[in-house]
Amino acid sequence: MPAIDYLRISLIDRCNFRCQYCMPEGADLAYALQQDWLTRAELRHLLRDVFIPLGFTRFRLTGGEPLLRPDIVEIVQDITALPATQDLAITTNAFLLAKRAQALWDAGLRRINISLDSLDPDTFGKIIGRPSVALWHQVWAGIQTAHQIGFSPLKLNVVVIPGVNDGEVLDLAALTRDRDWHVRFIEFMPIGNGDLFASQGWVASEILRQQIRDRWGLEAGSVRGNGPADVFKIPGAQGTVGFISQMSECFCDRCNRMRLSADGWLRPCLLNETGQINLRALLRDDVPMEALRDRVSELVFAKPEINFKMRESGTTGAYSRTMSQIGG
Ligand code: SAM
Ligand code: SF4
């Protein structure tokens, strides 16, 4: 079991997109009340006095859409200013990135993952539930801005859905040939939209890998912070292609992450909430830091037993929370 040193922090559970696979239009989503969001000061306090003393050094800001959080730049500043921080990254849909990338860079952020499920503006609009061609161009402008400012590695996340965007795998992989970009294909999970999962199914990474190998060949690759992705490179390419295969492989035994939701719930696993702790309530009840550290430490210690182990459990049954609610 690896050291548990990585915290994914959801800053907000709301989003300006409605990706079909994540939070489709009309889904009955219960949002956290804004007064229950962890404040900037609470987050700083938790990282400095609870997580860092327990050995956490790597953080990712996510959501929902983290760039919707008005104090995102200040939160980045706080985290990069903590001497123990070894790595900070953000996962975003890039809709607001062209506007905010420079301020995020100035605050010390260097790493960004961006969701980009299609290169075709029409298909993109359908996937994100906002059928406007202009949105793809705005997201693309955000990616270009981040690239020009120097964010690196710049990763693009693609959830592959049969019949929706699986015909674009080669075009998306080709982006890595003359750009230092890292395209990661993610297996669609039955979280967020069980109906879409039931109707479309999912594509195993191995099939996509073979398509790319047949076209250009593939060799071993690497990229900083590759997490659970298997990383390859098209020969001669500047960037890499990665595959995140949580449906066809179980990587629970390599999982080094805990998840903190926007309203302060600390969860040991994406799909298993056993032992979850409401850190917001404890903080607001003035529970001493030492007691908070003890609670978190117990949960970290219990994590290997709690991990969901989708494969061993023999089920991929749809889960009641979406990625946007848990902090994807
Ligand atoms: N809004 C940001 C974004 O889209 O990048 C961050 C939050 S989003 C929940 C984080 C990641 O979760 C995205 O890369 C998204 O593609 C992934 N995701 C959401 N629902 C998923 C599902 N059902 N299967 C696989 N990945 C999913
Ligand atoms: Fe929003 Fe990200 Fe979910 Fe799409 S994947 S709906 S952008 S939170």
Image (spheres, helix red, strand yellow):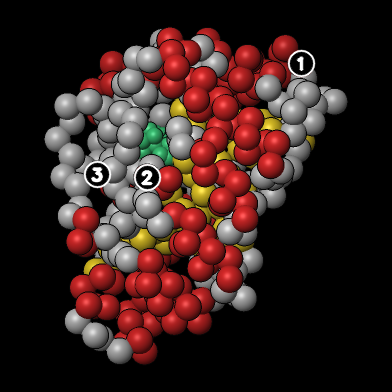
Which element type, helix, strand or loop, lies under badge 2?
helix
Query: Residue 84: horizontal and vertical position, in percent?
Result: 60, 75
Note whether residue 5 is visible: no
Name the kind of residue labelled 1 in the image.
Trp
Tags 3 and 1 touching, CB below 8 Å: no
Q: Which residue, given by chain and number where applicable, does mark 3 sit on?
A: 321
Image point (43%, 72%), residue name: 44
Kindly report the distance in space between the C-alpha atoms of the residues bearing marks 3 and 1.
Answer: 39 Å
The answer to which quarter of the image holds residue 216 is top right
Total numbered labels: 3
> Which of the two marks, 1 or 2, is nearer to us in this view?
2
Name the kind of residue labelled 2 in the image.
Leu
Which element type, helix, strand or loop, lies under badge 1?
helix
Of labels 3 and 1, earlier in sequence is 1
Which image quadrant: the N terminus? bottom right
In front: 92, or 299?
92
Q: Is 211 above or below relative to 116?
A: above
Q: Which residue, given by chain and number where applicable, does mark 2 sit on?
A: 68
The crowd level at tag 3 (other Cα within 10 Å; few <14, some 14-19, many 20+) is: some
In front: 237, or 79?
79
Numbered label attached to residue 69: none
Name the kind of residue labelled 3 in the image.
Arg
> Ligand 1: does it lie within 8 Å of the C-beta at label 3?
no
Image point (62%, 55%), residue name: 106
Image point (69%, 49%), residue name: 224
The answer to which quarter of the image holds residue 155 is top right
Which image quadrant: the C terminus? top left
Q: Is residue 136 left or right of residue 127?
A: right
Query: Residue 223: horizontal and vertical position, in percent?
Result: 71, 44
